[in-house]
Image (cartoon, rainbow, N blue to C red):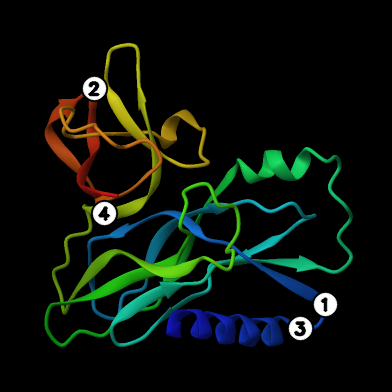
Amino acid sequence: MRSAVFAALSLAWLLACEGPQADLSPVTVLWMDWPSEVNAGQPFRTRLVVWNVCAINPQFRAGAHADQSAVTFEPYYLIGHDQIACLTERTPTLLALLALDTAGIVPGLAAASARTYDMRAPVTDYALSTTAAPNSAVGKFGVVTVRPTGADPLRRNAAGDVVAERDSLGCVSVRPVGLYDPGAALVLEDQADTAGLSHAFVRGYLHETATPVCGQTRVFKLESRN
């Protein structure tokens, strides 16, 4: 309940800042990946995959903010009042199946010694929700480790809704829901652990392997699914 109240207050404040000529259309986060380690005070880029909206020239806002324990994204689209109707009745449905692959910048985080912050964003009870419906809530995607110095920039933590796919050679990859570009598929490091990955919420990390897996050295290490 506290998360829902906070989100409502945050959106009200954002709308006031954007002015009277726009509406806010909040969206849930389908996929997020970010550096597993950053240096204190260093802003960092977080990849976000969110649903598209049926509107003319919508402006995306990541809605990132941080406190002493967590980084929270509350993404939304800014939509003008002068928007026109979508072209056909099918257009909203088609757009709802296409996700936006974008990013948000996290402000520098404080750390006198190595510590972690939660990475949080709105999620829904079911994988194919297209908006931040009333049943959405701010959920934990993972953590980022903040060090005073010496952070390793190569590994990226990752989490979100995925579908599994198998190619003609039997190699299994996971793909963030709503992304159809061939480059969006992530090869699983453990090709023996592939059960229960269709429309699952997974957590893990992206890293380089010494030995290629299915011809790829940049792979996804699966840590949990639900």
Give the numbered dot on residue 19.
Answer: 3
Q: Secondary structure at mark 3?
A: loop
Callout 1 amino acid: Gln
Give the numbered dot on residue 21.
Answer: 1
Q: Do the CB atoms of the residues marked 1 and 3 lie less than 8 Å apart?
A: yes
Q: Secondary structure at mark 1?
A: loop
Q: Which residue is mark 4?
A: 156
Callout 3 amino acid: Gly
The alpha-carbon separation of the residues under discs 4 and 2 comes to 20 Å
Callout 4 amino acid: Arg
Q: Earlier in the sequence, mark 4 or mark 2?
A: 4
What residue is shown at x 38% (from left), y 33% (from top)? 185
The alpha-carbon separation of the residues under discs 3 and 2 comes to 51 Å
Q: Residues within 10 Å of mark 2 (few under 14, many from 20)?
A: few
User: Quadrant of residue 162 in the image?
Assistant: top left
Q: Earlier in the sequence, mark 3 or mark 2?
A: 3
Whether residue 45 sits left or right of residue 131 in the image: it is left
What residue is shown at x 23% (from left), y 22% (from top)? 214
Give the numbered dot on residue 215.
Answer: 2
Whether residue 29 sits left or right of residue 158 in the image: it is right
- Depth check, mark 3 against mark 2: the one in front is 3
Q: Position of residue 92 (x, y in %)?
A: 74, 45
What residue is shown at x 82% (from left), y 77% (from top)? 21
The alpha-carbon separation of the residues under discs 1 and 3 comes to 6 Å
Give the numbered dot on residue 176.
Answer: none
Q: Do the CB atoms of the residues marked 4 and 2 lie less than 8 Å apart?
A: no
Q: Position of residue 29 (x, y in %)?
A: 48, 58
Callout 2 amino acid: Gly
Q: Secondary structure at mark 4?
A: strand
What residue is shown at x 47% (from left), y 52% (from top)? 126
